Image: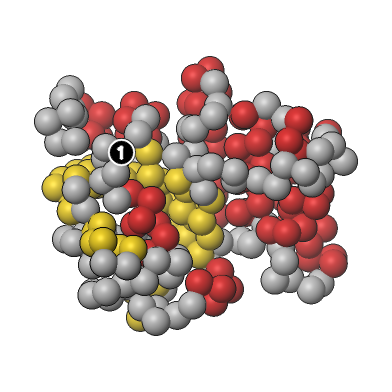
Amino acid sequence: MAGYGKRRVLSDVSIEVKSGEVVGVLGHNGAGKTTLLKTLMRIVPLDQGEITFLDEPVTKVPSVQMVRRGMSITPAEKPIFRDLTVLQNLELGASGIKDKTEIRKRMDEVFAVFPVLADRRGAVAGRFSGGQQRQLSLGIALMAHPKLMMLDEPSLGISPAVVGSTFSTIRDLARERNMSVLIVEQNVKAVTAIVDRVYVLRNGSIVLEETGAEAQQREVWWDLF
């Protein structure tokens, strides 16, 4: 159970994300999807229940320590630092790393995944298209080499033409790096195309869990939302 002050947002939630797995969380506006991510990241306090990460209880671990343990969160709104360059954004993603050689190595890894960022490494990020900003936000998260990457509405602000390729990149990264990914989304078609499993959250409670294959076959969703 979790929420803000006396307002309870999550009341009956039990989810699991296995190593290398991509898991989606769907639901209507106000269902508690973003609160779920913030609770897992220890930004929102947990009133009741337990959070386990890498087989260890982390219910009382502060959010800064969660990052060091291998968890990242990319917000739906303002996922990048618009007034900074690509390089400066990526450096912030590696803020816990002191070895400059290692930072450069991780930047090269990001540039290999997103070549447009390499081409515009000195450009101010706020001038990028929505799709490029979303790529940069993923790059920032990847700089920390997360074991669990949490993404809040990664399709937000990008054109429908590049949603598919962005989500395919997320799936490929999970497989190549054995990285777990938890995606909160309202774009049902995009997220069900890449997930191993999906949960539906309604009014703070999980009302459905099924495989990605089952989700792709489902014709009706709004009765669940």
For the C terminus, the quadrant is top left
The image shows residue 149 at horizontal and vertical percentages of: 49, 55
Q: Residue at x 73, y 59 (%)?
A: 92
Q: Is residue 117 above or below residue 10?
A: above
99 lies above or below 169: below
Instruction: Please give the name of the residue rendered at 18% of the width and 61% of the height, measured from the top-left corner.
Output: 11
For residue 46, what is the image quadrant? bottom left
Residue 6: where, in percent of width, then height? Answer: 26, 67
> Label 1: which residue?
29
Measured as percent of width and height from the top left, residue 113 is found at 67, 41
Residue at 37%, 30% (x, y): give it: 187
Residue found at the far top of this picture: 161
Q: Give the residue drawn at x 78%, y 62%.
A: 103
Residue 124 in sight from this viewpoint: yes
In this picture, residue 198 sits left or right of residue 44: left
Image quarter for residue 119? top right
Please state the horizontal and vertical placement of residue 173, each as a whole percent of the image: 54, 46
On the rendered structure, is 35 left or right of 217? right
Q: Amino acid at mark 1?
A: Asn
Q: Quadrant of the N terminus?
A: bottom left
Instruction: Categorize mark 1 by other alpha carbons within 10 Å: few (<14), some (14-19), many (20+).
Output: few
